[in-house]
Image (cartoon, rainbow, N blue to C red):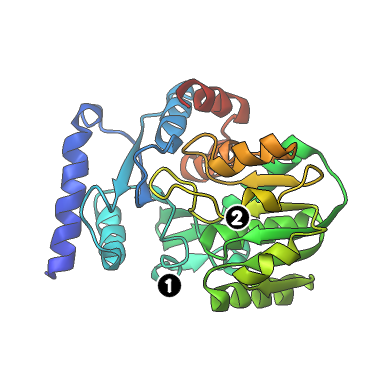
Amino acid sequence: MSMQFERAKAALSRVDAMRSDLNQSGPTLRIGLLGRGIGASLTPIMHEKEGERLGLAYRYDLIDFDALGLPDSALAEVLSEMKAKGYRGCNVTFPFKQAIVPLLDGLTPEARAIGAVNTVVFQAGGSHGYNTDCSGFAQSFTAAFGTQDLGRVIQLGAGGAGSAVAQALIGLGVSALDIVDVDVEKARALAEQMAKANGARVRAIAPDQLQSAIVGACGAVNTTPVGMEKLPGMPLAPDLLCAEQFIVDIIYFPRETELIKAARAKGCRVLSGGGMAIYQAVGAFTLFAGQAADPQEMAKTFARFA
């Protein structure tokens, strides 16, 4: 047995020890969240409270690679050990949404088009990847801003979450999408992928082009981790914003990022990541449990614990 597998097995045993209070009843549905720096995530409590409301024995574990001291390269072994331990599935967050794709046995057409997965369900046929980030973002955006004709939008970030948001923005009807990332090649690859899959006007821009590109844009969306509690800061300078624009940040811990605060001060319409977190959780819960979650109930839980 490889050292990597032994580390993964030991890490999940530590998770079991921390959740021993929930082991007594032998939960029928066991779910996990894979990521880094996820201690403040509200996804576990949203899932567990909804499971409780529906009368399910439902357990949701945080599998934080930072807290457990695991390298990124242990992802495959952790996934394998989760299956061996009887997990029904897992959610996936930064930085694994793209890295997990080749480790899965199947993908939905949407997840394949996006190239990223945030929900994995273990079934008899193996592990299957879904993306509820895309629908979660679209539902949150529409709930906040309504349906509208969207012009050109700037997207900051071309990672796993960025792939889902780009797909959602195109579906929402943006006339053009500019994607900027510190890794210009990654931005270019995502732009080409989105343009080919959707026939949309999508282009990659370098960070030094952002200042000129944002002029005339109807809004901007941050999909980078910049602004998270573990990576404080702002993904763009506040003096680039104007009151006519909308600003969306998909981060929800902290509940309000520096970008959202600065945008509100400028008079922009703003949307933080809470809505997307709720709606993606609704979609994931339904896949795990096989019965529909109630968005309003999950929103109440989010608000209570936020």
> Hey, what amino acid is under mark 1?
Pro
Query: Is residue 271 positioned above or below 10 on the image?
Result: above
Cα distance between the residues tagged 1 and 2: 32 Å
Relative to residue 118, is residue 266 drawn left or right?
A: right
Query: Is residue 69 positioned above or below 21 on the image?
Result: below
- Residue occupying the point 43% across, 68% down: 105
> Hey, what amino acid is under mark 2?
Leu
- For label 1, the SS is helix
- Depth order, front residue of 52/218: 218
The residue at which mark 2 appears reads as 236
Indicate which disc residue 102 carries.
1
Sequence-wise, the earlier of marks 1 and 2 is 1
Query: Is residue 211 positioned above or below 28 on the image?
Result: below
In which quadrant will I find the N terminus? bottom left
Circle 2 crowding by C-alpha within 10 Å: few under 14, some 14–19, many from 20? some
- Depth order, front residue of 20/158: 158
**Number of the front mark, 1 or 2:** 2
- Residue occupying the point 59% across, 29% down: 294
Relative to residue 102, is residue 111 drawn left or right?
A: right
Q: Quadrant of residue 201?
A: bottom right
Residue 284 point in image, percent of width and height: 52, 44
Specify the farthest residue to the right.
149
